[in-house]
Amino acid sequence: MASNNEIERRRTFAIIAHPDAGKTSLTEKLLLFGGQIQVAGAVKSNKIKKTATSDWMDIEKQRGISVTTSVMEFDYKDYKINTLDTPGHQDFAEDTYRTLTAVDSVIIVVDGAKGVETQTRKLMEVCRMRNTPVIIFVNKMDREAKDPFDLLDELEEELSIHVRPLTWPIESGARFKGAYNIYEHNLNLFQPSKQVVTEKVEVDVNTEELDEQIGASLAEKLRGELELIDGVYPEFDKEEYLKGELAPVFFGSALNNFGVQELLDCFAEIAPSPRPVKAEEREVEPGEPKFTGFIFKITANIDPNHRSCIAFCKICSGKFTRNAPYLHVRHGKTVRFSSPTQFMAQRKTTIDEAWAGDIIGLPDNGTFKIGDTLTEGEMLHFRGLPSFSPEMFKYIENADPMKQKQLAKGIDQLMDEGVAQLFVNQFNGRKIIGTVGQLQFEVIQYHLENECSAKCRWEPLSLYKACWIESDDPAELEAFKKRKYQYMAKDREGRDVFLADSGYVLQMAQMDFKNIKFHFTSEF
Ligand code: G4P
């Protein structure tokens, strides 16, 4: 039974936010509670400075540095908590999407003054695709914030999820007095401090005590608001939360470590332990005795002399043991890992075992590809590592005729690592690279030149979206492919992709071919 306890106590999650909402500050405070760091300020932001977009080497370096901090684990009470970091820079959004396939729940940080921002909206879409349970932390209440009721409406509307406040702020900005904990019925009074966790005061809101603590007029207002909340929002229902339909909402200030403990306590209690994972063949339960896992992220170190990578593996079931023989399903080969690592706040340590829910780092020199499955022998293929339609496209051409092979190999390797997506146009056979940001083109070119001794040249290509197409009507599918033959491509898995050059063209295609489904992600 020990194994099940080990799995039950695990909480694997990611914090997601629009850049600057306070993800780094919140992560740091969580680590403080977990005892992983002793003082605030110890966690370096892996945020990429906005001014440095032209100097992407710095960005890669920062990415290299952030390898060790991209998964952080700590113990809190009886729980083992695994936090997965997600890159702040939106050019690496694809990385974040993939990271979300390896977590069992998320905490969304929203800036109380700005409300829901673009990146939050996009990331929430990914959560919705997988019914990931979500907790919302409204941050920066020590600054002038939007009205909390308006914020709740905005969250519901913009994120398409029901919400239920579990704490309630008393004013904001200079007048910020603290928060009332609705489910524990106590008051947390605000003291601006980066180090101290404030004492909670037990108060009965219907007594004079509340007036004494926050003044008569605020007490009156709070009573009214709490009544309104009870009237408008149904009781918090954990089952609905676990289904990804209802998000509990907390208010606080990550910078001042205010409201973070309430969030963490509630998170540890209600957040799911590792959930079953779907493979093509069957659903895999975390409690199964045999080890299974998949690679969801590969990070290259920035060392021009040799290309060493770390493949991040999410353990889906059972127990992983160092040096044990495992099956690399795609290669059909047995592999052993003598130095698997786990990640603490600022360091990496070799581990002997790990359990379902954990993320381990496996040293990799080209044996892994994103989505690869490891098992104890079973032929399993984990699904659900979606590719999203890229937003930028360029033709990639060989600029050194003597290095054709090196170029092809280099492109393959970079695509395996998930740096970008490759499509081959079926009409002219040209290779097209699709990315979510300009930066990736520079990253690809640098790696090809410096590590693969290959040279590439980019040619502009103006496309709106790449859509994966499918249909139950083979005749219509054929007719479509014939009509659009110049715009048909294959992805690396050989799936049909339609390259729409404008939103209008796509709309017309959708109208003319009603029996064809156009997907903006490769998972459908
Ligand atoms: P991110 O990882 O989501 O991008 O956000 P991060 O925690 O780095 O926070 C972004 C900025 O917001 C930082 O300021 C941080 O200090 C500030 N911040 C975070 N939480 C709070 C809060 O609760 N209240 C207030 N008032 N500010 C908060 P910065 O000036 O960009 O950086 P720094 O010089 O403070 O490090």
Image: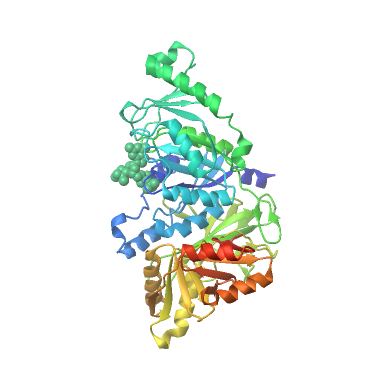
Observer-nearest residue: 338 or 151? 151
Name the spot of residue 249 as percent of width and height, x first.
49, 35
Q: Is residue 221 above or below residue 316?
A: above
Q: Indicate left or right for 311 with 174 as reference.
A: right
Image quadrant of residue 1?
top right
For the point 52% across and 34% down, the residue is 265
Can I make out residue 39 in this image? no
Q: Quadrant of the C terminus?
A: bottom right
Image position, residue 191 (x, y; %): 35, 27
> Quadrant of the rendered structure where residue 93 is?
bottom left
Name which quarter of the figure residue 59 lies in: bottom left
Q: Looking at the image, which residue sits at the far left?
A: 51
How many numbered marks are there? 0
Q: Is residue 146 above or below residue 391?
A: above
**Residue 400 percent coordinates (x, y):** 39, 85
**Where 175 falls versus 479 (above or below)?**
above
In percent of width and height, residue 241 lies at: 59, 39
Q: Looking at the image, which is closer to me, 352 or 12?
A: 12
Q: Which residue of the protein is positioned furthest toward the top in this rendering? A: 208
> Is residue 460 found left or right of 8 in the rendered image?
left
